[in-house]
Image (tube, rainbow, N blue to C red):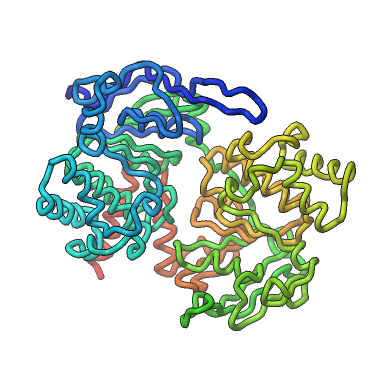
């Protein structure tokens, strides 16, 4: 057997915690983890948010992010323990022997520099290549990663390429210096399914052709099953299970792993509409201020009480723009919006207090949707006071009722957002929306930033609250698994137009239009060989055309 390129032994990592009103203290967040990675092997690190995946991945660069410290253990790379080497050796290691691909390429690239300048930077600084040699290698990688115009794309700036293209450019950046190990940290999580499959295929092809070792960090087992040879399952800094991809996917030994494998088991029967629609959009056409082209084209749809309409499509298809139009943030250029059998004013300032109360939103990023200086009680209590003028004991009692509804309890009323997990933060945002007693809640990618187990709990909570409160949902998402779990009706959008619309059973049944077929076939399945089968099928279809 090939000798391990990376050997991690008894890795322990700590961090300093600063509790509100309390004394700072050190805690251990990774507890004695061991693993090996051989040249040409891909090890998947899987687990919930806070499991320690990224922290462990960054330890292979001898790096602790955000004040995190490696407190014990050994990390061997190319035959030396990098935790006991000097700083000059660490600098040669980072960006040379070991490279890193982050989750958000858009946040990682310098917007003021051309892509090529950034892709070749570490290769030139480390003396691996001259500038002309590095540019030549970068162009070869652009070809391997199936980027458009590979000979000239490096002359563009980051904002001049799509999110999926920029993620592939970042992969080229990581592969350019010919590293021994690449750490992929959730490289496709922020991408829609059609872009994700292209990036996954490009990453897998590059790994196989170049022969580097890789750590692939993700919370999505279906994704990691397509690229990893082995998988290590983590929970709260501890290794729960470690085995081949086949064993982890098809015969997991531990209960936690089995829960990850079986996630998204919600069976939501499609409900038929009753009564009059709570929302009707008729021929909505809209454009952004200062532009001369429309971003929504004749969009029409209906939502009924106690039902969920899912709006799906790629990034840029018009999903969130439609939500902005319904809420009055982007007045339509043409068409009208009827709500509860009355016509809504197209712009937000002209709407009544009742209009504002009856349409609420839950946002994708709960972290930035709450004031970090306000307690849970204040956050949930604000709409209660604003819309119903309740104060004192009456307001507090209503806050407690809502905390019970979201399955958290009154003990959370005095906590701040920093003291909550990602799932708890999103539950508080749900309670805040429910506090207004709305008839429609617009859910904008509310589970896309959450790991599967937490997201599953949020979806079940939303379905339960819908039956209790008789509220309708407009559920914006690019996750087709979520759509199948929660929707009654579906709108498929493409380039600002309605591509397909109807009951869930109809939209998800053939015959499909080309775009809907592409969306549905791009949803990763938790089985080995799925990616290769999809790519082979598309190659045959392309050859046939």
**From the viewer's perspective, is residue 76 above or below residue 305?**
above
**From the viewer's perspective, is residue 223 above or below residue 490?**
above
Q: Quadrant of residue 218?
A: top left
Q: Nearer the viewer, residue 341 or 32?
A: 32
Q: Nearer the viewer, residue 511 or 529?
A: 529
Residue 83, position as x, y percentages in the image: 30, 21
Residue 139, position as x, y percentages in the image: 16, 56
In the displayed structure image, the side of residue 80 where residue 185 appears, left or right: right
**For the C terminus, which image quadrant?**
bottom left
Residue 51, position as x, y percentages in the image: 48, 30
In the displayed structure image, the side of residue 516 where residue 391 appears, left or right: right
Viewer can see residue 475: yes
In the rendered picture of this protein, how many numbered marks are placed on residues? 0
Q: Nearer the viewer, residue 79 or 374?
A: 374
Residue 347, position as x, y percentages in the image: 67, 75
Residue in the picture at 62% in, 62% down: 309
Viewer can see residue 534: no
Q: Quadrant of residue 192?
A: bottom left
In the displayed structure image, the side of residue 388 where residue 303 appears, left or right: left
Residue in the picture at 62% in, 51% down: 369
Residue in the picture at 61% in, 52% down: 486
**For the N terminus, which image quadrant?**
top left
């Amino acid at each position: 057997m090939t000798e391990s390129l990376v050997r991690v032994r008894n890795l322990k990592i700590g961090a300093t915690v600063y509790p509100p009103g309390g004394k700072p203290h050190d805690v251990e967040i990774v507890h004695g983890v061991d693993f090996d990675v051989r040249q040409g092997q891909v090890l998947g690190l899987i687990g919930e948010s806070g499991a320690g995946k990224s922290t462990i991945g960054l330890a292979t660069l001898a790096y602790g992010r955000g004040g995190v410290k490696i407190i014990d253990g050994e990390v061997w790379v190319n035959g030396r323990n990098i935790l006991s080497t000097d700083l000059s050796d660490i600098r040669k290691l980072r960006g040379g022997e070991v490279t890193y691909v982050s989750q958000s390429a858009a946040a990682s690239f310098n917007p003021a520099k051309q892509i090529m300048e950034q892709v070749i930077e570490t290769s030139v600084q480390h003396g691996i290549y001259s500038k002309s040699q590095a540019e030549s290698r970068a162009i070869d990688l652009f070809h391997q990663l199936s980027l458009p115009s590979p000979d000239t794309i490096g002359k563009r700036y980051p904002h001049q390429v799509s999110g999926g293209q920029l993620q592939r450019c970042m992969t080229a950046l990581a592969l350019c210096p010919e590293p021994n190990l690449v750490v992929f940290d959730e490289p496709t999580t922020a991408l829609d399914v059609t872009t994700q499959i292209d990036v996954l295929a490009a990453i897998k092809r590059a790994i196989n052709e170049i022969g580097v070792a890789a750590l692939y960090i993700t919370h999505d087992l279906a994704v990691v099953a397509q690229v990893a040879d082995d998988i290590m399952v983590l929970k709260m800094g501890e290794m729960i299970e470690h085995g081949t991809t086949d064993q982890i996917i098809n015969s997991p030994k531990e209960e936690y792993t089995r829960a990850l494998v079986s996630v998204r088991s919600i069976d939501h029967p499609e409900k038929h509409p009753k009564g009059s629609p709570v929302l009707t959009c008729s021929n909505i056409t809209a454009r952004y201020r200062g532009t001369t082209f429309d971003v929504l084209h004749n969009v029409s749809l209906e939502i009924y009480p106690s039902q969920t309409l899912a709006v799906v499509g790629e990034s840029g298809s018009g999903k969130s723009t439609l939500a902005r139009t319904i809420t009055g943030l982007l007045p339509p250029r043409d068409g009208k919006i009827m709500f509860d059998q009355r016509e809504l004013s197209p712009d937000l300032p002209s709407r009544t207090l009742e209009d504002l109360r009856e349409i609420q939103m839950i946002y994708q990023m709960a972290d930035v949707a709450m004031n970090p200086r306000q307690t849970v009680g204040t956050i949930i209590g604000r709409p209660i006071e604003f819309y119903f003028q309740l104060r004192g004991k009456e307001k507090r009692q209503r806050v407690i009722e809502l905390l019970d509804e979201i399955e958290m309890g009154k003990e959370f009323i005095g906590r701040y957002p920093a003291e909550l997990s990602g799932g708890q933060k999103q539950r508080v945002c749900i309670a805040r929306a429910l506090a207004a007693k709305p008839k429609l809640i617009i859910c904008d990618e509310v589970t896309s930033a959450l790991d599967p187990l937490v997201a599953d709990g949020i979806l079940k909570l939303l379905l339960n609250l819908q039956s209790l409160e008789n509220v309708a949902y407009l559920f914006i998402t690019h996750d087709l698994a979520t759509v199948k779990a929660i929707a009654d009706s579906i709108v498929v959008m493409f380039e600002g137009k309605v591509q397909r619309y109807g009951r869930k059973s109809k939209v998800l049944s053939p015959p499909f239009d080309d775009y809907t077929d592409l969306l549905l076939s791009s949803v990763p399945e938790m089985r080995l060989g799925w990616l290769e089968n999809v790519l082979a099928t598309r190659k045959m279809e392309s050859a046939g055309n």
